[in-house]
Amino acid sequence: MENKFNIIWYNELDSTNSEALRHIDDFDNLSVIAAKCQSKGRGQRGNRWFSAPGENLTFSIVLKPGADGLRKISVRDYFDLNRVSSLSVVSFLSILGVDASVKWPNDIYVKNRKISGILIENSLAGEEIASSVIGIGINLNQTDFPELSNATSVKIITGNSFSVEDALELFCKEFGKTISLLGSNSLSETYEEKLFQKGRLCRYSDYIRDREFDGIIKGVTESGRLIVKEGEEERTYAFKEIGYIL
Ligand code: BTN
């Protein structure tokens, strides 16, 4: 697929995801809605996403599977979009000198600190994804996070600052490479290689059984459930059924 990203910069938006969703019919496949400042940045589980104006990347990529040579994506494979977006952030960060991993399903961590978050909002047509808004926040130049205790940034880790415009161009290149892996085994393999805490005995909250336990992440099922082993027992979890105790 030839990747023709169309990056549209705004000085301020409530949320790049909200803007993309409001005008989804007007935006072409691979439009990138980027804001220097978001007044109501949205995170997962109804949380807010805080980002100092002008310092970080906050943007949303509009995907229209089936358009411009982008393969169709069945609802069954929706987790592949988590894989593509998480791995794009990881490879982008690695170019900037940051070694990051994916805290399932799609938070990006460096050691025990969060450097990037992803909010994917899909609309469906029957059994297929008609459009997807992939909202990504990446902490680039911010060094002070008053609202957050576990945040980090590229600047904190490397000491270097980056232009947000150049950084977004670079990110789109990485995203273009990663999305071409859709439908291949190497997408899930690379995602698993980058999984935070995989293979290590760590403590988790099981929200279904209302208990904490020590377990080992073994991987992720094709449909995106987290596989965790406790002693001899292997269980799989959906989002919101398990929490990391860091
Ligand atoms: C999370 O980790 O909770 C997800 C955070 C997603 C934040 C990004 S910033 C750009 C896009 N617009 C939003 O309102 N949210 C996403």
Image (cartoon, rainbow, N blue to C red):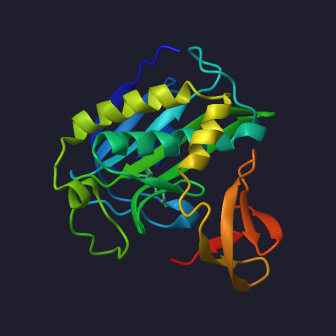
Choose top left, top right, bottom left or bottom right for residue 244: bottom right
Whole-percent x, y for residue 163 in the image: 18, 41
Choose top left, top right, bottom left or bottom right for residue 151: bottom left
Ligand 1 quadrant in view: bottom left
Q: Is residue 58 above or below residue 103?
A: above
Q: Is residue 21 above or below residue 197?
A: above
Residue 73 lies left or right of residue 195; in this view the side is right
Whole-percent x, y for residue 167 in the image: 27, 38
Q: Name the residue rendered at 46%, 39% in the picture.
A: 88
Residue 238 lies left or right of residue 131; in this view the side is right
In front of the other: 178 or 94: 94
For the image, the number of numbered tags is: 0
In front of the other: 159 or 125: 159
The residue positioned farthest toward the bottom in the image shown: 211
Q: Name the residue rendered at 60%, 20% in the picture.
A: 70
Q: Name the residue rendered at 55%, 24% in the picture.
A: 180
In front of the other: 72 or 238: 238
Q: Name the residue rendered at 31%, 32% in the picture.
A: 170
Whole-percent x, y for residue 9 in the image: 29, 36
Whole-percent x, y for residue 232 in the image: 82, 72
Q: Is residue 27 visible?
A: no
Q: Is residue 7 visible?
A: yes
The residue positioned farthest toward the right in the image shown: 233
Q: Is residue 199 above or below residue 80?
A: below
